[in-house]
Image (cartoon, rainbow, N blue to C red):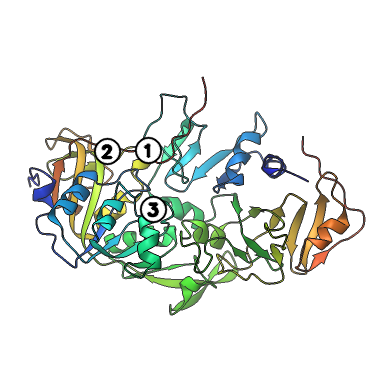
Amino acid sequence: MLDKVGIAKRIAKEIKDGYYVNLGIGIPTLVANYIPQGMNVVLQSENGLLGMGPFPFEGEEDSDLINAGKQTITTVAGSAFFDSAMSFGMIRSRKVDLTILGAMEVSDNGDIANWKIPGKMVKGMGGAMDLVASAKNIIVAMQHVNKAGESKLLPKCELPLTGVCCVKKIVTELAVLDVTPEGFKLLERAPGVSVEEIKNATLGRLIIEGDIPEMIID
Amino acid sequence: MNKTVKNADEAIKDIGDNTTLMLGGFGLCGIPENCITALVKKGVKGLTCISNNAGVDDFGIGLMLKTRQVKKMISSYVGENAEFERQLLSGELEVELIPQGTLATRCLASGYGMPAVFTPAGVGTEVAIGKETRKFMVDGEEKEFLMEMAFESDFAIVKAWKGDTHGNLIFHETARNFNPMMAMAGKITIAEVEELVEAGQLEPDQIHTPGIYVHCIFQGSNYEKRIEQRTVRKK
């Protein structure tokens, strides 16, 4: 079974040289730490920055320089600032190659819910609806089951949707799955996790073909 | 063409009860601190505020929520404010949550003189309820879009890094965010800047918002520029 860092490391393997990538809040943010050295990747922060660097050194925080999670950050060589309209312009016109975000639920046709729990949580969708409606490629980082042990990979999302038929790939603590027209296709198992365990944790349609390899993290 | 006013009190003097305001900023970054303080002092009520976020409990728009000056918020993300959540759940505050890109683009449309825009954000979700949809061919594929209306706002209040007496504005780093579009979208636009200079002292090539969109400008004071999430690494 993977921890959060393990999920982030596995997702980092999906990033290719030359990609522009938008990372959501939470586990997706960690992915930045595991992009292979020497690979040219530019991180987009939807509040108006291309070329997001690491956190600043202590004492060098700049209140005018934050990411979409409102964390203090830095720029890198080749960074550019722009306004929010242009930021979503580059998202909508599919210039961003890959979007990685978290989810509360995903359905087996690729619908995603991650912004609202009616009566409980009213934080808002931020940029998530714009991102999922336009992204060329969306990878979801999420827990396979909730705290009560219930599957979050469902035949149909129960929570209000963020977007429809948009998720392409899911990485959880148990597995890597593609979203296909026929349902979740199991690609890899987390170290020490059996196909049976993944079956039991998945409520949506699950396709298992042949031997499912264990994922390689490091 | 001198648009300079003395301070925030003078800049906001025409803002009355029940008006619609746009306020620039992302989180606490690039917010018009001086004007928010002046609005709290003036005590105008029944405001509809269009702003990406709603501040925190004791800073930014949060200060206007505490004094119950806000009737309605139109935002994309409001997660950092407990008082906000309390007023929302108790029904004291009306809230319209909309996608962040839609928020930005509805400001942009207003400033560009376009009544509506089409966006795929929110198709198939509760954001689409009651909205006109239309299908267009994009990259050889038919895709559904929502029609979203340009905002109409009585006032826009923005914060820039530098400005001149003609109202030309330059923003700094990610404090730019929603400020340029909101500056374009207000019927009346108020700009507060960290440094105000005479016309001619800013490089025309560097101007982000041309002064034609700005009706009054002043140099703010005592900027706190609070950091919401201080994240650092060790040397």
Say which chain tag 1 marks.
B
> In the image, residue B142 lies at what x, y percent?
58, 72
- Tell me the CA gap for discs 3 and 1: 15 Å
- Residue at 9% x, 47% y: name it: B3
Q: Badge 1 local density, few (<14 within 10 Å), some, or many (20+)?
A: some
Left or right, B76 with reference to A159: left
Say which chain tag 2 marks.
B
- Residue at 72% x, 56% y: name it: A144
Q: Are marks 3 and 1 in contact (CB under 8 Å)?
A: no
Between residues A127 and A144, which one lies in front from this camera angle? A144
Residue under disc 3 on the same chain as residue under disc 1: yes
Q: Specify the amino acid type for callout 2.
A: Asp
- Badge 2 marks a residue whose secondary structure is helix
Mark linked to residue B187: none
> In the image, residue A215 lies at what x, y percent?
81, 44
Left or right, A109 with reference to B50: right
Mark linked to residue B205: 2
Q: Specify the amino acid type for callout 3.
A: Asn
Q: Which residue is mark 1?
A: B227
Residue under disc 1 on the same chain as residue under disc 2: yes
- Residue at 48% x, 56% y: name it: A127
> In the image, residue A97 lies at what x, y percent?
59, 49
Q: Which residue is mark 3?
A: B81
Q: Nearer the viewer, mark 2 or mark 3?
A: 3
- Tell me the CA gap for discs 2 and 3: 39 Å
Q: Nearer the viewer, mark 3 or mark 1?
A: 3
- Tell me the CA gap for discs 1 and 2: 30 Å
Q: Badge 3 local density, few (<14 within 10 Å), some, or many (20+)?
A: some
Say which chain tag 3 marks.
B
- Say above or below: B13 vs A4: below
